[in-house]
Amino acid sequence: MKNICDWNNCNDVGEFRAPKERDNSKDYRLLCFKHIKEFNKNWNYFSGMNEAEIFNFLKSDMTWHKPTQSFSSSDNFFKVLWQNVLDDKIDIIQKKDNFHKKIMFDNNDIKSFEVLGVPVGLKWTEIKIKFKKLVKIFHPDMNAGDKKYEEKLKLITLAYTQLKKTYKGKN
C-alpha cells in the first residue's frame, strides 16, 4: 500500500516527510517530490518568532538545547571535581609535612644512615630493602667466615636496629 501525497488534490505517491509543526518532529505528513520542493522553499522555522525568541533559540542551539551552568556555579560538576583534586593534593602535602615534622633524627640516626649507605630521611620500606641487600653481601656464609665481613654485618645490623627504633610507629 502506497501513501498518497498530503498536498491538496494531489494523487502522487507521498515519499518525503514534512513536519506539521515547528517543534514536533515526530508528527509529519508525506509529500511527493514536486510538493516537498515547494514546501522546502516556503518553510521557515522561525516564522511567528520575534527577534528575542530567535536569538534565544540560536543561543540555546549552541549547547544542543541542554541546560548549562557557568564554570563559576557552585554546584558545577567540574568545579566540584577540581576542588576535590586540589583538596587531595593539599592533604598529601600536609601529610608529608607532618611526617617530616614528627621524625627528628639524632646523631645516632644520621650515623646509621651513613652505615647503611642511604640518604637521611629515606622511606622505611627502602631502608629495609637496602638492609636485606647488605645482609646478603656481608653475611659470613657468603664470605667464607671472614671476620672483617662479620664485623661489618654487626655494624649494619646495629644501624638498622637504631633506625627501626626511630621509625617505629611513625611511618
Image (cartoon, rainbow, N blue to C red):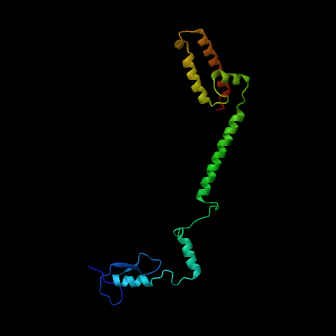
> Toward the viewer: 16 or 91?
16
> Quadrant of residue 148 in the image?
top right
> Quadrant of residue 4 in the image?
bottom left
Picture quarter with the N terminus? bottom left
Q: Is residue 67 above or below residue 15?
A: above
Q: Which residue is at the far left?
A: 1
Taking the image as shown, residue 8 lies to the left or right of residue 46, namely left
Coordinates of residue 7 in the picture (x, y in percent): 36, 87
Taking the image as shown, residue 138 lies to the left or right of residue 101, namely left
Coordinates of residue 144 in the picture (x, y in percent): 53, 9
Coordinates of residue 29 in the picture (x, y in percent): 37, 81
- Residue at (30, 85) in percent of width and height: 12
Q: Which residue is at the far bottom?
A: 9
- Residue at (63, 23) in percent of width and height: 117
Coordinates of residue 49 in the picture (x, y in percent): 54, 82
- Residue at (52, 14) in percent of width and height: 142
